[in-house]
Image (cartoon, rainbow, N blue to C red):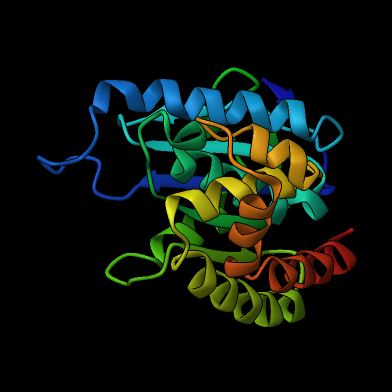
């Protein structure tokens, strides 16, 4: 266990929607999907300071993001990677996520869910706030009341948009989040699609609006 200091960090706590229903994808594949999503996130955002993913209770997970300005983009990447099912060849999962902002007092590098600090408490409060609601995304800040008040409004509106996405739209946005061109996004589908089709998926997903929300977050948390 190591000290993390008092700098503001972001903690992402998530769980999988409907993972225990009879008609859900094979739950034995879920751990592999979560690990793959985390692995690709670390490759796509090497400067974000992402911890290893800690999977617990079978369908819950947690990650630490040292640079909070990247937290919303990474959250969307994880959501869209899981929903997109690797471009339609794999199982599709919907994850809820609670983003917590604040200091981390102690970080367990092997099992981040055992760590301590206000960021972890805030993340738990955020995911708990989703219980019994249709929403899949929430945030809570132990660092700034003003950020929490405005941030809650932004992520609530963004979540309403994301919950409308199809599997293909989610996969297209997943590529766009890490800066892929439309040609590269099209090639990442299974089977590949045309560049215009990839562009249509992004347009129907309102990618411009997503970009505006990400810019707002990055400017206020960086």
Horizontal relation, residue 39 to residue 13: left or right: right
Q: Quadrant of the N terminus?
A: top right
**Coordinates of residue 130 in the picture (x, y in percent):** 39, 66
Q: Position of residue 15 (x, y in %)?
A: 39, 45
Q: In this view, does 148 lie to the left or right of 15?
A: right
Quadrant in the rendering for residue 5: top right
- 75 vs 86: above or below: below
Residue 118 shows in the view? no
Q: Quadrant of the C terminus?
A: bottom right
- Compared with 85, 207 (above or below) is below
Residue found 40% across the figure and 29% down from its top: 90
The residue located at (44%, 27%) in the rendering is 33
Q: What residue appears at the point 39 percent right and 49 percent down from the top-left corner?
A: 94
Q: Give the vertical position of 25 relative to 139 (above or below).
A: above
Spot occupied by residue 23 in the image (x, y as percentages of width and height): 13, 41
Residue, far left = 22
In the picture, measured across the screen, residue 148 lies left or right of residue 113, that is right
Nearest the eye: 193 or 169: 193
Query: Horizontal and vertical percent for residue 174?
Result: 63, 45
């Amino acid at each position: 266990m190591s000290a993390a200091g008092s700098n503001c960090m972001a903690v992402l706590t998530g769980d999988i929607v409907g993972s225990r229903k009879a008609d859900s994808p094979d739950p034995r594949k879920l751990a592999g999907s979560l690990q793959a999503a985390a692995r690709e996130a670390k490759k796509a955002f090497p400067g974000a300071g992402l911890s290893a993913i800690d999977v617990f209770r079978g369908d819950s997970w947690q990650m630490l993001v040292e640079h909070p300005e990247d937290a919303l983009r990474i959250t969307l990447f994880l959501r869209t990677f899981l929903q997109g099912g690797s471009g339609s060849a794999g199982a599709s999962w919907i994850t809820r996520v609670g983003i917590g902002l604040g200091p981390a007092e102690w970080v367990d590098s092997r099992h981040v869910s055992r760590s301590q600090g206000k960021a972890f408490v805030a993340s738990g409060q955020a995911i708990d706030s989703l219980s019994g609601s249709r929403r899949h995304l929430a945030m809570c800040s132990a660092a700034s009341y003003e950020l929490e008040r405005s941030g809650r409004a932004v992520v609530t509106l963004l979540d309403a948009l994301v919950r409308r996405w199809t599997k293909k739209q989610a996969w297209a946005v997943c590529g766009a989040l890490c800066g892929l061109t439309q040609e590269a996004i099209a090639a990442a589908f299974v089977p590949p699609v045309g560049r215009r089709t990839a562009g249509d998926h992004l347009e129907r997903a309102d990618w411009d609006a997503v970009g505006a929300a990400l810019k707002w977050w990055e400017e206020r948390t960086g």
